[in-house]
Amino acid sequence: MVTSVMNPVRPGGGVSVGPRDTVGYRVFTWLNTITLVVICLVTLYPFVTLLAQSFSSAGAIKAGLVNAVPVGFNLETYRAVMRDGGFWTSYGNTVLYTVVGTAIAMVLTTTFAYVISKRHLRGRNVLIGIAVFTMFFNGGIIPNYVLISALGMKNTMWAIVLPGALSVFNLLVMKAFFENLPREVEEAAQIDGLGWFGIFTRIVLPLSKAMIATMVLFYSVAYWNDWFAAFLYVDRNELFPLSLYLRNLIAGASTTTAASAAAAGTTTDVISANIQAVAMILAIIPILCVYPFVQRYFVSGVMLGSVKG
Amino acid sequence: MKREPTARPLGRAARRLTALATATALTGLAACSGGSGGDDPAGDLNDAGAMSGYAADTTFRATEPVEFSILWTDWPESPVKDSWEIFDEIEERTNVSLELTHVPFSDHVEKRSLLISAGDAPDVIPLVYTGEEQQFAASQAVLPMSDYVEHMPNFQKYVEEWDLGQMIDNLRLADGKYYMVPGLQEVSVPTFTLLVREDVFDEVGAPIPETWDELRGALEKIKAEHPDSKPLADGFEGGSMLNYAAHAFGTVAGWGYGNGTFFDEEKGEFVYAGASDEYRDMLEYFHGLAEDGLLDTESFTATNEGEGTVTEKFAAGEVFAASGAAGTVQEFSTALDATDAKGTYEIVQIAPPGGPAGQVVEPRNFWHGFMLTAETRDHPNFLALVQFLDWLYYSPEARDLLRWGVEGETFTKSDDGEYTLDPEYSLKSFNINLDGDTDIGEDLGYSNNVLSDSTESRALKESYNSPQYVEYIDSVLSTRTPRDPFPPAPLDEVELEQASLLATPLKDTVDTNTLKFIIGDRPLSEWDAYVAELEAQNLQGYLDLINGAYERFAQENG
């Protein structure tokens, strides 16, 4: 089981060190607190710097003057980025791809996982085998490209949404979860006259809210961050997702690209660091807002899985 | 073993993609989509829409409306907008409408490989630098342009007028054909060179250095004034500085190392640059700088990203001379403006210093040009396409249009050839008419990165660049000599593979030891041991391969 440190930090601050705690425990608690605070700061620092950069002037960033506090404070960069039509188009695309993609992915994953979670199903191993096979082997990029192209999905939302719509990893987690649901509940429903589909939609799914929330989180973050599918299958600007827009903005301006471009005899104009920072901040905000709320389910989902037998 | 559905680690994916695309192109898998490529050069071309009397300096106009697709790289700062009138203007003049296939700049090379390998590329592939066409040529996925240049009168005119014939011959591959046509430059100067803080050089009484020895003298004086500084740096892991320094020392290095061979005029054969005495002299020079604290060795080992970049050091007054291009001057200035030095500094881009080999700079260069995918050979308007591209890429009329817009509307050209932008318009990317309401670049699509800077006369090049840059061009052209290009030694497919197997470990050895020798991790007294290491990696076999190809090509092509 999980060893949880009971309330090491009191709301008012100060480490809880009760009279009955041993010295070893106190030391442990202190070290724990310090380590976690350090980890927290280390994780937070890049984000704070990014935030500071987004409010700073380009020159100050280049001169290396910006750490945690903005230098040359301005909101002009935010205005400039928000005025850029391409930014909002790609933002809208990403929201659309994420919502549609996650919805499709959830339908596919839950239904498939439910079927293969039934041990009495004949041919179940074949179905699992087909899914697992793709974890180890795939056609490669160019065959995939030719396939998507031949299916007429190039330059449509489907090229981005469908290829990633079933993650075998998520499928297997879901399957394990369904397998652990008490069979008796389903049997009771069956006796009461529900068919398999009714059991699935009216009994199993409502019991799996935590798991579903976790999966939604996995899928939506993956769709939100995905640039590769769009890079491969889309060559119209108005369909680019935010990730590709950002990648172009940031990777396109990195020194390595500049160097390789220079080796080829060209120069690249460098997008200033403050614009990059603003675009990144604006891109993380939605996920940042959703995460804390869904994360609650994520934790309880993991706990559910851990209570076995 | 967590596997997310679609997100992949970016570096790996990109690498895998490149490798795959290259492999596919090389093994000829893509050739199945190649269509009719080779044997029938310009026999009977599909000439629907083509002009019958098309000649140099006439405006191309298709006899019927035609449409061609073109690969379009989107730079993040200049996305194609609805307000762009450039494509309408081209259509109005030529009856050609262009359909764009967009690729983001960040990965455009990979995407290009993918599209060509999958047989799904648009007709015209612009932004191709010399050498990049080879992998596609091997599988005949692109057309041998040398078969069609007879239909390109403007191209031929300027190749001759600007004396580029020999350089064009150098583009020929083992089969004697070339598969891309480059952007022609009437004059060509090194893009990257040394940038110096002129005010600091003045302050310590050092003249602008003409040679590397003079530079050393100046650095010593600066070091005496600013003991905490390491005045010389390279923001590109040494690649840039070694590149332009190598020409002065009579060798190749850094970005310009290429396949590592250097043509020895006296011996009449290729020798290995990394094992030559000239290379050693260059290393000795830089090691000397490093030893005396004149060279910021950190900048030779770390990329110019994150903390402690050369830009930051330049702004902090720890570095006073560094590598860069015209854009770098801008970058350094922005950073310096954020410090107390604002208004007191002056950065100039100087001609690369000379050295033992004389006042020599890199050979003249082409700029990016285009290739055509093999499928276009079957396009009903193929001849019209070739004529159109000849007009677009090489005719002065089109070059003016692509850079400045419509004459009499956005700009005027005086009798002595001076270009003036109309005050209503601006060109912010080159700091011209900043008060103009409409930007001919951002808003109208002129001066774009894909088409506008490919072929340029000297007058056109100097028309939009800053006076400082024009001064730099003039100083290079008047005081430096470009090195002669090496004679061609094209390898066939099998040899290419052998050569890359041999060249890669050799280059790795050279790269590692170059740094070690400069920094002082390895004493230069071990030079002979180092050369022996190279020889143990079959250096001679590699040179035999290159020299064999050189002799073969010379025999076959006179």
Image (tube, coloured by chain):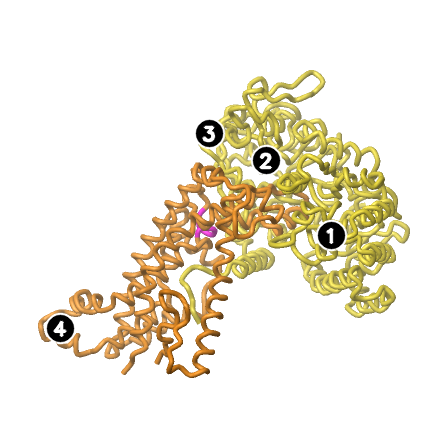
- Residue B181 in view of the camera: no
Residue extending furthest toward the left? A192
Residues packed near mark 1 inside 10 Å, few (<14), some (14 to 19) or many (20 plus): many
Q: Which mark is residue B83?
A: 3
Q: Is residue A130 above or below residue B322?
A: below
Give the crowd class for mark 4: few <14, some 14-19, many >=20 residues within 10 Å: some
The kind of residue on which mark 3 rests is Ser
Q: Of the numbered discs in the image, which one, if any, rests on residue B256?
A: none
Q: Quadrant of the N terminus of chain A?
A: bottom left
Q: Mark 1 and mark 4, same subunit?
A: no
**On the image, numbered disc 4 is attached to which residue?**
A189
* Mark 1–mark 3 CB contact (< 8 Å): no
- Give me the chain letter of mark 2: B
Mark closer to the chain start, 1 or 3: 3
Which chain has been coloured yellow in this picture? B
Residue B464 spot, x, y in % from top left: 65, 29
Residue carrying label 1: B490
Q: Earlier in the sequence, mark 3 or mark 2?
A: 3
Looking at numbered disc 1 in the image, what kind of residue is underneath it?
Pro
Chain whose colour in the figure is orange? A
Of callouts 1 and 2, the N-terminal one: 2
Residue A114: x %, y % from top left: 26, 70
Same subunit, tags 3 and 2: yes
> What's the chain of the residue with tag 3?
B
Range of the magenta residues?
Answer: A230-234
In the picture, which quadrant includes the C terminus of chain A? bottom left
Are the residues under marks 1 and 3 on the same chain? yes
Disc 1: host chain: B
Chain ID, mark 4: A
